[in-house]
Structures are given as structure tokens and as C-alpha cells.
Amino acid sequence: MSNKSDFSTLPAQAVIREVGLRDGLQSIPTRVSTAHKCEWITDAFAAGQREIEVGSFVPPRLLPQMADTAEVLAFARTLPGLKASVLVPNLKGAERAIEGGAHLMILPLSASHAHSLANLRKTPDEVVDEMKRIRAARDAAGSQTLIEGGVGTAFGCTIQGEVKTSEVLRLMQALLDAGADRVSLADTVGYADPHSVRELSEQALKIAGDRFCCGHFHDTRGLALANVYAALEVGVSRFDASLAGIGGCPHAPGASGNAASEDLAFMLQACGVRTGIHIEKLLALRAKVVGWLPGEPTHGALWRAGLPKTAQAATAAH
Amino acid sequence: MSNKSDFSTLPAQAVIREVGLRDGLQSIPTRVSTAHKCEWITDAFAAGQREIEVGSFVPPRLLPQMADTAEVLAFARTLPGLKASVLVPNLKGAERAIEGGAHLMILPLSASHAHSLANLRKTPDEVVDEMKRIRAARDAAGSQTLIEGGVGTAFGCTIQGEVKTSEVLRLMQALLDAGADRVSLADTVGYADPHSVRELSEQALKIAGDRFCCGHFHDTRGLALANVYAALEVGVSRFDASLAGIGGCPHAPGASGNAASEDLAFMLQACGVRTGIHIEKLLALRAKVVGWLPGEPTHGALWRAGLPKTAQAATAAH
């Protein structure tokens, strides 16, 4: 045991992008009404959240929970300063995101060929081609909607097992070359560990610099927050998370879901990283949302234990 | 966002010290029989665990679950290469640990004066005096039993709130001066975050060097594994953990318990840190122990999700 380094500078601030309304709600059978979704967004905004993924422009027959995405997006756009993003699986979805005036649309790509074929019925390179078409459509429309390429199964895959780092980085570069404004990394199936997160994030930053904008970590094996911390240490400062940890990997039933937004906000603020989030308000919203999801598994630890005595004053100020 | 550093060397190996039989069982009403405790130790040993805290030499009227500690310790000593430790609250307990031939005895000290008085009915400095008496008794007996001073509430306290770093470090130094062979840090109430863990661990290493031997993190607010990772990064390579995460803080009912041994083993091995633990065997033991604790809250994520496809070959080899 030795004192190896005094490296310990974390980013001064970080963004928690709320994905509960998309990644969370799309994974569970309970339908949340459009009115409740808008109430969720209103309360999240009031608690200080400024980036929210409000839904997914997929065919309603595939994900009926997301059928009201256009309406929810329209509502989100009325809140000043809120950046509303949507997931788009293809050009058709992107056209709806552009039409709806989303601030950001995220095109997911799976770095695992097997997962990509099973999930999207396309090879990763066919998704790269779709990115080109989406960029062309965005530019042709004179739209301001940003485009993010989300590289999923970046740390391994339940179907194919290992996913090579070189392939993850190749596809990240290809998405940028195809016109993505920015890229992100997702541990879609909960295979990441802090060491691999640190290493891959460092390499992604070398390729994409500031255009590598977000980490998305599932808590399937309990490591989501450790993974966030590892990414934070190398300078990543935006993370997807889901209130009450809902969502996560549909291939691991019963397993934990996403990083829980409220636990992540607590960790970041305890570490001195500003998030702009009022944690008590977020916990109040969590209780409300859990009430809308009777019988659905929810996660997280902070809601049980409450804030430490030492944090109560500090969090209000952040 | 920027690529700040390539610091990423973790220790090549780390020890998970199993505390489920002490910290875990003392916190829950269900009594586990002496035979089951010995079976637990046998199976943990077979799964590769080599350091186990087998009990606590406290008055049986206070903790009847620990009344068989001498017997369990005697059994643990029959397993070749197993280091059996016990918790001792005072000289009287230390005398029993010496008599029983424990490899290590741990004297807890609470850096929070308020917590120390409430829990141990002594000031922290009175505990330091007890350390002097214990060291004298150990030396007088010609015993080989090592003495660890465990500095608890090192990251804050539910009663007094803030605990000053300077006070934690002063007491750590005082324990060493009083004759402790080594010292450890405990987040007794789950107030720690990775940043504070990193900072305090670095300072502890400056004071105690290799004699700062262990971190003990509760998962009360979901940060136990992130905290372990932060300590690991600065060179700490021994961690207390409890199978199924049992135990933890009695002041936070319903909250998560200790770091779960099985999840911690997974994280460490996934990060390339050897633990000597066969995770599948540990998961089998977990299922057995959970069966002995009907109705008691248990924790952890790995048991639900299982090992990733990418880890299955690797873990057997560690």
C-alpha cells in the first residue's frame, strides 16, 4: 500500500440527464399518462434538472408507452432553459424530432454486432449510414436539433460477450465522421467496471474531445455509481440517470436498473461537484413517480436513509 | 471535459476481509447457530477468503449473537492459512482474544465524541488509553495477536454531524502511539463519498503508511463500492465487507448494510485486482446464508444478475 498520486481534481460541475421518462418508462409495462409525464418534467425542472430525455420516436406498436412523445416534447419546450432530448431509432424518428423542435436527438448504435442485429435489425455500420441520412435531413431542414450518436454495449454484450475497444472507438469515430455533433458511451447491459470505464473514457476523449459528452451506466451489478466516479475522474461531466433507478437492461429481469438520479446527485454533490439539483425536491418527485408505478421494481438507497446531517445545508446551496 | 491524467494503476491484489459473521450477525435479531457459523467459515475459506472477522468479545447480555465467539474462533484456527480476527471493545475482550489465539483483534474507536459517548460510554481518548492497556497485556502474555485500532465515524456522524479530519488523524496517530500495530478507517454511518474517501485515505497513508491497513464502508446511501474504488486508487488494498451486505448501521433502519462481499469481489476482479476469491462459490455460500436468515434484509446486485459472460472464465482463474 502506498500513496501513489495526488491526482484528485474532479469537474467543478456535472449534468445529470434524466432518462427515466424514456429508458425507464419504456422498460416497464405500467403506462404513465401524458399528464403525469408533464408533471414529472415540471417537478424535475423545479428541482433543478435542465436536461431531460422526454421520450422516443419509435413506432407506437413497438413501444406504446412512448406514443405521446410529440406531445410531451411540446410541453417540455415550454419550460425556459430546459433541454429536451428524444431517442430516435432511425431517419423517420429523426424527422419527427426535427419537426417537434427537440433540442437534441440521440441515435443509438450497438457496438456489438450480435446485439445490433437482434435489437435494431441493422449492423452497426448500417446505423452509421443512417446517421449520415439524419444529418442531411437536419441540415436540409435548417433545424437546430443537435445529433448525438450513442455507442451502446460499449463494455460487453449479453449475446456476443466481449466487445472490442477498438471496435467501439472505430464506430464512435465513424458516427462523428457521419455527422454526429457529439457521441456518448453506454453500458447497456451492466458489464462495465470502474477500471474499464476509466480506460475507455480516456480513449474516447482522445478521439472526440469535448464531443464525447455523456456516460450511461446501468446498475445491473451494483457498479453504476463507481463507474460514474471513474469517468468523472478523467473529466466526463454528463451522465444519464433515471429517477428511482427505473429502466435498465431488459435482458436481465429482476436486476437493478439505471443509475438512480437521486443517488447520483447525492454522490456528485457530496464530492463537491455542482449539479444544480435540489435533492430534497428530487426525493419528493421520486416518491410521486413511485406512486405512479405500483408494483414496478424501483431502486436507489438515498430515499431510505435520507441525506446525511453533514449534507443538508450544502445540498440546498448547490 | 478534458483528459486530465493517465493515473490509473490499481493494486495488483486486494483482500476482502469478511465481517458478515460479526458486523452482519450482531446487527440482526436472527440467531445463527455455532454450527452454521463454522459452516459459513468453512465455505468462505473454500471460496478463497483468507481473512474473516469471526465474532466479538463483548458481554453476552449485550450481544447474545456473539456469545459463541470463543468457540467459533477455535474452529477458525483449525483452517490452515486463515487469519481469524475478532472485535474487542476493551481490555477484557482483548484478554479473551489473546487467550483464544486470535490472529488479530480490532479495538473500535469513534472519532465523533458524541458517538463515542453514546456507543462506548468513553471519550475517544479514553479508548486510546485502553489501547495502551491492551498492548501491555498482549506483550506481557507474549502473544502473537496483532492489534488494530479501527477509527470509526471517520466521515461524519449521525449524532454530532461533522467529524473533523484533523481529529480523525490525531486519533489515528494516538492509537499508533499507544501501541496499535495497525489502524483502519470506518464509515460507520454511511456518510462517506468517493472524494472524501480519497482525501482522507491519502492523509492516513501519510501518517501511517503500510500500517493504515483497511477501509470499512457502509452502503447506507449506495456509495460503498464507489468509496472502495476511490480508496483503491490511492493504494488501499484491504476492505471489510459482508456477505449479502448484511449489517451496517443500526442507526439507519431499513437502509442498506455493508458493502456486499460478492459485489465487491466482482468489482475488484473486473478491475483486474486479484482477490483469490472464486465468485461462484461465494454466491453459493450467499444463498446458503440467506437461507439461515429468513425475513432479514439482504442486499447486493450480483446474485440477481449473475456474472457477465466476459467475466466467467476470468473469475475462476483469480
Image (cartoon, coloured by chain):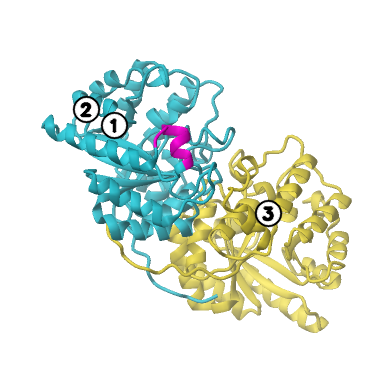
Chain colours: A yellow, B cyan
Residue placed at 54% from the left, 54% from the top? Answer: A225
Chain assignment, label 3: A
Residue assigned mark 2:
B79
Closer mark to the observer between disc 2 and disc 3: 3
Quarter the C terminus of chain A occupies: bottom right
Task: Classify mark 2: residues with Cα within 10 Å, few (<14), some (14-19) or many (20+).
Answer: some
Reading the chain from its start, which is encountered first: label 1 or label 2?
A: 1
Tell me, yes or no, whether the highlighted magenta stretch contains residue A62.
Answer: no
Chain assignment, label 1: B
Residue interval drawn in magenta: B114-122
State the mark number for residue B45.
1
Residue B296's place in the image compared with B240, above or below, is: above
Mark 1 residue type: Phe
Residue A148 appears in the picture as rendered: yes
Mark 2 falls on what kind of element?
loop
Residue placed at 51% from the left, 51% from the top? Answer: B162
Kindly indicate whether the residue at mark 2 contacts the one at mark 1 (C-beta within 8 angstroms).
Answer: yes
Q: CA distance from mark 3 to mark 1?
A: 43 Å
Mark 1 falls on what kind of element?
helix
State the mark number for residue A279.
3
Q: CA distance from mark 2 to mark 3?
A: 49 Å
A10 or A296: nearer the viewer = A10
